Image (spheres, helix red, strand yellow):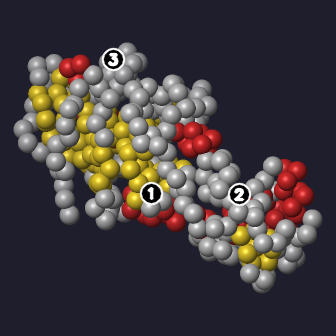
Amino acid sequence: MNIERQSPACNILVAHRAESGLKLLRFLERRTGLPRALLHRWLRTGQIRLNGRRVKPFERVQTDDGVRLPPFAPDMIKAGGGLFASGGESPLPPPCFGVFPGTGNSPFLASIGHKGDIWALYKAPGLPTHGGTGHSDSLAARLAARYAGAPFIPVPAHRLDKETSGVLLAAASYRALQELHDALRERRTLKEYLAWARGAWPFEGIRLLRHTLRKQETAGFEKVRVVLPRDASSREALCFAQPLKILPKMSLLRICLLTGRTHQIRAQLAALGHPVLGDAKYGTDKAGQMFLHAARVVLPDGTVFACLPPWRGREAVEKLPGIMLRG
């Protein structure tokens, strides 16, 4: 997909709106594909100029800024497969709306909604957020393939575990990515999950779950465990849990995260003796479908993105409850 327009001069890169705020060196690396050491040398010797002036590598580009390269640079960029032309104001179109598949076995991207360059995508169970050892397919890889040639390839702004389904936020511009990272770090977003937990939940109403977690490596896999608060390498994990349906052998819970620790919900529920149904890592089940779903995300401005889980049969959920926390 190529949405660029030709630069006004053969050796000038024009910054796209989606690239606004990028450091100059990062902008050049993304655009040209040339070695960082070479770009540093061109900047140091004044062969690269920003809007006609000499600049340092870490100055930030803004929309429609012109970055002049040496006259021989375009041939080097084309030979390496880099993206040369750009500029303009047109935003990227988000992926199509559609029926969400239950598995991650096809190169499918579905949009739940968007607010400017902030996209809410559906992540299917079984699909990793990012690629890694043992798997090349991921939501990030599908975005990169779908928007190859875009001035700023959309990227996930956070992650969901591979077997967790639901709402995942992505950014289609550098500024949107920074805004999301700031909001997530400062806990100005609200994230709600649904989970089927093993056993009859013993608590009524909304209950605060507080644990101290520490990461550890187990047989080459990342896992967290509950430790005493005085453990120096530990971090506090907080969430609210509310039962929506309690059955003799399993309970449907709504979880509202207050912190965003690795595997937090899975580890906290397991520590209480009620692991997520289908969780082979923290429970006793064999590997298979895990019943944990990111049901709703609320942005700081009140924008809500939500979707039902892809569960069928007795685990099906037909309607989401109202938002647990407001304001």
Residue 78 seen: yes
Residue bearing mark 2: 30
Q: CA distance from mark 1 to mark 2?
A: 21 Å
Q: Mark 1 against mark 2, which lies toward the viewer?
A: 1
Q: CA distance from mark 3 to mark 1?
A: 36 Å
Task: Give the residue displayed 44% in from the left and 57% down from the top.
Answer: 118
Whole-percent x, y for residue 203 in the image = 9, 36
Residue bearing mark 3: 285
Whole-percent x, y for residue 68 in the image = 81, 74
Q: Mark 3 against mark 2, which lies toward the viewer?
A: 2
Kindly indicate the quadrant of the structure image that contains residue 250.
Answer: top left
In this view, 298 is above or below 219? below
Whole-percent x, y for residue 235 in the image = 36, 49
Three-letter code, disc 2: Arg
Lateral position of residue 140 relative to residue 13, left or right: left
Q: CA distance from mark 3 to mark 2?
A: 44 Å
Estimate how packed mark 2 is, as few (under 14), some (14 to 19) or many (20 or more) residues with alpha carbons within 10 Å: some
Choose the circle earlier in sequence order: 1 or 2: 2
